Image: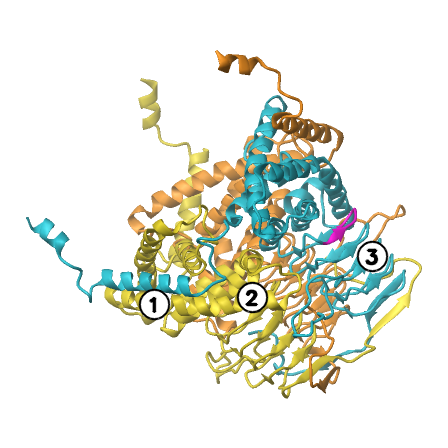
Chain colours: A orange, B yellow, C cyan
Amino acid sequence: MAVQRRNHKLPDPASDDCVIQSIVDELFASYEELGGINHLEGINLPNRQTVEAITYDLLKLVFPGFYEETRLRSNALRYHIGARVSSLTERLSREVQKSLNYEREAEVSEKDSRKIVCDFLRCLPAIRSLLQKDVQAAYEGDPAAISEEEVILAYPGVEAIGVQRLAHHLYQQGVRLIPRMMTEIAHASTGIDIHPGASIGEYLFIDHGTGVVIGETCSIGHHVKIYQGVTLGAKSFKKDESGRIVKGGKRHPTIEDDVTIYAGATILGGDTVIGRSSVIGGNVWLLESVAPYSLVTYEEGETRTVSMVSDTEVGGGI
Amino acid sequence: MAVQRRNHKLPDPASDDCVIQSIVDELFASYEELGGINHLEGINLPNRQTVEAITYDLLKLVFPGFYEETRLRSNALRYHIGARVSSLTERLSREVQKSLNYEREAEVSEKDSRKIVCDFLRCLPAIRSLLQKDVQAAYEGDPAAISEEEVILAYPGVEAIGVQRLAHHLYQQGVRLIPRMMTEIAHASTGIDIHPGASIGEYLFIDHGTGVVIGETCSIGHHVKIYQGVTLGAKSFKKDESGRIVKGGKRHPTIEDDVTIYAGATILGGDTVIGRSSVIGGNVWLLESVAPYSLVTYEEGETRTVSMVSDTEVGGGI
Amino acid sequence: MAVQRRNHKLPDPASDDCVIQSIVDELFASYEELGGINHLEGINLPNRQTVEAITYDLLKLVFPGFYEETRLRSNALRYHIGARVSSLTERLSREVQKSLNYEREAEVSEKDSRKIVCDFLRCLPAIRSLLQKDVQAAYEGDPAAISEEEVILAYPGVEAIGVQRLAHHLYQQGVRLIPRMMTEIAHASTGIDIHPGASIGEYLFIDHGTGVVIGETCSIGHHVKIYQGVTLGAKSFKKDESGRIVKGGKRHPTIEDDVTIYAGATILGGDTVIGRSSVIGGNVWLLESVAPYSLVTYEEGETRTVSMVSDTEVGGGI
């Protein structure tokens, strides 16, 4: 019986199976040797796909009818919403528990995690009311916007701000990992990177948004407009005696009400305050405070225009 | 029968089920109170996932064989393509009808929507012919490109331009929401944000592309090259007597043939015309027209270089 | 029998089926006429979805336990990892064979492709060891980072660098298409575009990262920090006598050890060397080399601040 005999043969050391076995062996040796980048035995961390599904289910609760495959009809609506809230409570509680177990290096009870999640879900109506104002700000702020519905369906700023407002609530309840994962999911989808710690007023409008970065300790007032490529960042990092960067502290700017910041502007520093109703022109690089009602732009005449016959050495491509 | 009796008991007001019920009640109250961000009873809007699936199916028709999981063989090809066109006609007609019902605030017939879609699908060969030229422009314009096949498989600019050229046709037929959703799907995937209204000539090459923004009333000639982070935007928005932004009007620049715009340059204004064969250097900020064959760059000597012993206060991180 | 007779009737030339048929006919005519953008009969190219699945499976091997839906327990771990390595070997070998068949315009054997893949998989422990250092650099370099686990779960730079380090190994073994597809998959997900050809030292930290572009012939030392929107690109492209761009050659800068490059800076040219421990300030535009320990920033006083009563003409929005 040829088959059986083949099964009993030792694998040929030069055969392909042996190569795979040695690859696996070397990987295992590496898992055992190197700490810090695997979590096989340790605390069970929140899962990225699960947090992503939860995040989009939260957006569905916040904008009902906008992300649905099929039309929601009101007679069946209560069942749909009830089922979604119930499922979210289960799934988010489990991820919050993992997140807190890890962050606090202590066993957090299922009941405590569930309480945090229920408190969070209770805030959804308040978050909806904030987001309605953000949508209104986008519609009123962009001549190309044809309706508030278009804004919800096709403006990435709404998704990024929506997820940040949700994540910010969890962040305020002391959860750390999950809010960061949520805003990073929005960052991957929209190119807009807002830390869950940032404090943001009403009627924020971020247009286009690719490349926007808003830091953890930023404070943004009401009716602020921000365009693509704007950074609200840190000026420098304090280091301790051993040369290590000091964590924490106010490192990012304060933007007062009614400020507009155009594409590519960079504003840095925890002491930097942009006074109310100011306008920061595109590509401006700003490391200090400006008074209310300031207009900050480039000096004129800083570019050089020459006429040329043929293509000359300039760059930017790679 | 304990089970039955348990089923008859009223829920304990302090129990978890009651909490979920009150969360659902509060959400419903919020849905009823706040207008503008839900569409439960109103007009059925186009669905984002459906439009996304349609968009990628259109790309599969335009680049046959490139997005397929399995190899397409020519003897079965007509069946595949026929089935895809037929399914696309159904699905896109339904979404176009939703889009038009909403935009025109009137019932648009299935037949009219279907006619628009059939006219649109008839343009696919013309769009293919345009895209072939875009692919050629990328291959010839980038020293790192190894073949036209690599350009289709790995250059995000091709996806962004392809989707815009498709969306632009629908936009020209008077559909508004769906083309915007299509270009926003490409924006999320590529970081390149081109409004479906923009008018674009032949042989456009966008390299890398993250952060590129091209506005609704932009007009771009033939053989134009654009690098990452370039904005072709509006200078300011006209407001009416009540202070509201006026919608419409030519707000974005005109780029003539053979122009190259390097990374991070910003060109603004509806009256701004970049004359043919001009080169706009990286990071340039341009609010006015330049003559043909101009080279616009920064003045020299605007940066300061100092030697330092240790790390000094500079910024950009957050 | 009405049904049968209907089946025998010729389709009405004005009916909808005829329209679909003519759309399909026109598409086929276009497929036959235009070369270069379809691969129906030609060489079977690597498939994008397959390469995407392979890329994320490789990341799962490199960061075991981080991307898993369910917890990996050590007693079953060897089975999981073994199955994954075995499946990866099969799938990647098939795609590598397609890639090489196409690139070399010759039939490459299954065995040769498999050997390349096995050699590649053997490098995973070395790549893990590099990535552990990248994670450490991020944790130590960002005051907002709360742990190395958060860095892996929520910092897009880790994904982009991880994929590039994997792709770079395949690139060095002479595979071209698949490494480019891999880094482009990471680009779509993170906004960070690193060519697989770039040579990168240990402890690289890319923060936020949207809009970062690192070119094919870039050489980056150890302990380098790069922020969002940084371009390491080419200055200009050499053209041959017929005006075509010359492929190949060192076109991108060299960044020495311990250099920090802040948000939006652009550094261009194959001869440009940024000397060790230098700091390049945000938005700086740099076309030439700087000595070690240089600090390059904007000149002061280049922006203009005016007080204003009402909104004035400035721009950046579209």
**From mark 1 to mark 2, how far is it between C-alphas?**
31 Å
| CA separation in Å, label 3 and label 2 | 31 Å
Majority secondary structure of magenta residues: loop
Circle 3 marks a residue in which chain?
A: C
Q: Amino acid at mark 2?
A: His
- Relative to A231, is C259 on the left or the right? right
Q: Where is residue A117 drawn, in percent x and y?
A: 53, 41
- Is residue A156 placed above or below C100 in the rendered structure? below
Name the residue: 39% across, 40% down. Answer: A83
Please rate how many residues cluster around mark 3, counting C-alpha atoms within 10 Å: few if below 14, some from 14 to 19, many from 20. many
Is C144 included in the stretch rendered in magenta?
no
- Of A99 and B179, which appears nearest the observer? B179
Q: Label 2 marks which chain's residue?
A: A
Q: Please report the bounds of the magenta region as a residue range.
A: C198-204
Task: Tell me the tag on residue C259.
Answer: 3
Asked if the residue under mark 3 is in contact with the one under mark 1, i.e. CB atoms within 8 Å, the reply is: no
Task: Name the residue beneath numbered marker 1.
Answer: B122
